[in-house]
Image (tube, helix red, strand yellow):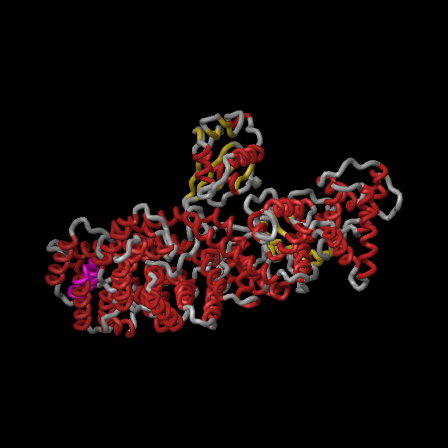
Amino acid sequence: MQAPAERPPPASASPGIEEVRWRFGAFTLSEAQRRLEREGRPVRLGPRSFDLLLQLIRRAGEYVRKDELLSAVWAGVVVEEASVRVHMSTLRKALGEPGEGDGCLEWISNVPLKGYRFNGRVRREALDGGAAVQGRAVEPSFTPLPVRLTELVGRDGDVAGIVQSLASHRLVTLVGAGGIGKTSAAIRAAERYEQAHGARIAFIDLSTLISGDHVVGTVARSLGAAADMPDTIQAIVQCLAERDVLLLVDNCEHVIESLVIPMTSLLAALPRLRVLATSREALRVTGEYVIRLAALAVPGAERLTLEEALRWPSVQLLVERGRAAGAGAFGEAHGCVLARIARQVDGIPLAIELVAARLGAQSVDDLARRLDDHLRLYAFGSRAVFPRHRTLAAALDWSIALLSEGELRLFRRLSVFRSRFDVDLALGLVDGDMDPDEAFDALISLANKSLVSFDSSDAIAPYRLLETTRSYAAMLLSRTDERPMLMKRHAALMLELMKAATAELTVRDERAWSMRYAFHLDDVRFALKACLAEQPDAKMAASLVSASAALWFHVSQVEEYRDGIAAALELVDRQLPEDVETATWLCTALISALLHTGGSMSELAAVSGRALAGARELKVPMLELQARWGRCTHDMFRGEYAVALQEADALLAVAQTWSDPSALNLAHRVSAMANHFCGRFEVSRQHSEASIVMIGGTVHTRASMVGVDPVVAAMAVLCRTLWIQGRTAEALEAARSLVARAQAVGTSVTMCAGLYGACPVAVWTGESDLARTWIHMMKDEAQRKGLVGWLRYAQWYEQGLLPDADEDRGRQVREVAARLPAYDAPRKEMLVTFCPEWIDDDLFERVSQGKAQWCAAEVRRAAGRRCERDGMAREAEAHYRGALETASQQGAASWAWRAALDLARLWVSTGLDARAAQLLAETCEQAGDGAQGRDIERLRQLRRQLAPAATGSRRAAVRGRPARSR
């Protein structure tokens, strides 16, 4: 079946994917978790280095050429060959030297003209994904702690106190002024806590948020939980249940009101959870333990030797950072000067780092003198400000005063970025205003001066502004007239970035794509908000929301994406003259978002109708394709299959006039689904197979629309159709194959689309264990990524297992039957194929009106069962005959077998054994000896019991029909 979404992005690895681990020496490498451990301890590797190691291990003992490594690790990206050499050097350092028993002298060797080879003995272990699912929940994917690039100075006592407090309190808040070092101390404390207690650590950075509305979603994404579920808190609880976890929630002060309730709810629901928060003020909730982090201690004495001064942590930090900036040697005479500088900046770590960055360019004596003059002037004009805030502001002012005009321009413009950024994005802010080389030098200079943070371990976006410096830079920007222009430029940069992200969906795997683009969410959100409200720009808002679809789906913020589309559409509608094309594109995007988030049928009808009308007016082929797909999918989801078939026929007719293979492929898949639900199973099968045959090497394109692997999408409908046609073995094999392929593709939407077809096949076949595994996979994947549109199907299939339950079957079946009036028609249709007791008058009326033809035979059979229970044998026989006739006309052999079995049992119960035997013989002969499955075997068993050799007691057993047969 087609997924209810337009171009959803790749999603996290499926919980059912086979877990592969590679062991060599003291190391264990996990493919699915992308984790390398040495004797159980994690080894930090960048994403490229990890991928290089994985490529080499998979071909251990072979030489792998450099061009092969570039193609595999940097797919679709133009890089220099030196990149392999640089990352290989990093990899060798991380692995260290092999041990005596490791079978090699070096882990990785390089032979010119041959390539690189992994020399160690490697052992591969594969754990069955399905079995793992049944045993316990999928290991969540936490956002790891940031890599500390420098040693933490002077905080040993503070860190020990934090760790000790966490042992006895479940919510600890580290409070202090900006720049005081809260984040660094908290990260170190979390590392120590992990070492001491073995808890898993998750890092949640709230500094990038522009609104408290996004707190819960940010928390969920940091934990690998679905951020777009109806109850996101419950999704987080399920993710963390039965685990020892410490959440480090950083920079809480601006969203405290939105954070308090979620945190207290999680702590109440998860007794093994602990929270370490950093904030400029306490959260003020019950059970909170507050630790106030002071500045680093400063020496009080005026005359100190260098040795005496270095006993003070503030001076230690100043000297260490000064040396890192290129300062010369410090002599004994510098002790008192260094102590004075530490006192001048009140021991505030950020202020110390800012002034220390100047020691590479001026002497310590000159620095102290100039800083003293600046601080006196600042204090004179800022007496109303708290002393420590005044000191930090003064240090920032002093650092800014030393910048060149180009450096200052770039610094204040960088304040628009909410998260990390790379060189290209930074230079994009001054494009046309500064020479690129000059701008690049300015960026490097700002990093050297500690005004811009640089993370050398981040190969994707190594730059960012700390919250304090970003706020300061934003204040500087507000004093200029650049902001309106800059917001437009920022939005344009995000638009180009999202276009590139969409293009790379086909060339990057899910994890690589996520690492490159997911962290840009807050910047995209910021740009979109500006286009919608601060500086209304309908065209840019529409373009940005459309281009960023993949990102919103990937981070499970589909509801927010939906609201963004609706807001952009409202803005477009207010523009004159009317922009039909933009509005129509937005409507097609809104259809898929509504399908995912459970939009009302009336809203879906209005939007899909408008999209189709606009597409027809514009005569844009791709737009018409998407609009017709949306309308057809909407009609199928609401159970209007005949209308959907008309749309599918129109879609196919339109696609056949184009030369776009992917459009025709989509049309075949939609036709397969529409014909399936209209009971035209043979036609459906032909369309599914036509789709699979023509796919060949066709890559995913915009015309594929739904973001599902096209083979999986086609096979999902095909396996259901094959089963209904009585080709049980083929159907089950197709189901297994499509699940394996969906796992290999690795996207959540593809996984759910595949399981949509596979799960009912397993239930119908009686493969309860397999069905249970697949249903669990589908539920977990849908919940983890917030795919509400898919979750409902998993819930239907889960109910389908109840009739085969060993315990309390009757009660559970009755409970579902009692809830039928509240279910929509498509759900009732599926449920009646699982249990004939799940029928009501409305469903029977639908079939009588010519609707729900795909399960019409099953509905008539269920009506016969109901009449038989009520002692109405003649009416029951009429319904069974009607079911058999319908199934025969449709070529629905499996439905026919069920109807024939019930009819034969009815005849046996009324003494018409010969008639029953004749029906069974005809049915079995039509099925052939090669037919397999639970239902045909029951037919054969009854036929054997009715054979002339059968004893009277066995016939009596036949007449006592089993109550729980389907």
| Secondary structure, magenta segment, majority class | helix
Is residue 956 at all visible to an observer of this figure? no
Which residue appears at 16% of the width and 72% of the height? Answer: 874
From the top left corner, tell me how far across and down residue 160 is, in percent: 71, 48
Using residue 166 as the reference point, say whether residue 860 is left or right of it: left
From the top left corner, tell me how far across and down residue 866 is, in percent: 25, 71
Using residue 214 as the reference point, say whether residue 572 is left or right of it: left
Q: Nearer the viewer, residue 305 or 762?
A: 305
Q: Nearer the viewer, residue 233 or 649?
A: 649
Which residue appears at 55% of the width and 68% of the height? Answer: 533
Q: Quadrant of the N terminus?
A: bottom left
From the top left corner, tell me how far across and down residue 280 is, in percent: 70, 59
Is residue 20 at all visible to an observer of this figure? yes
From the top left corner, tell me how far across and down residue 112 is, in percent: 48, 26
Up the image or down, 498 lies above or below 868; here it is above
Q: Quadrant of the C terminus?
A: bottom left
Using residue 916 as the reference point, say whether residue 218 is left or right of it: right
| Start-end of magenta stretch | 889-909
Using residue 437 as the reference point, say whether residue 108 is left or right of it: left
Magenta highlight on residue 302: no
Magenta highlight on residue 902: yes
Q: Nearer the viewer, residue 113 or 802?
A: 113
Q: How many marks?
A: 0
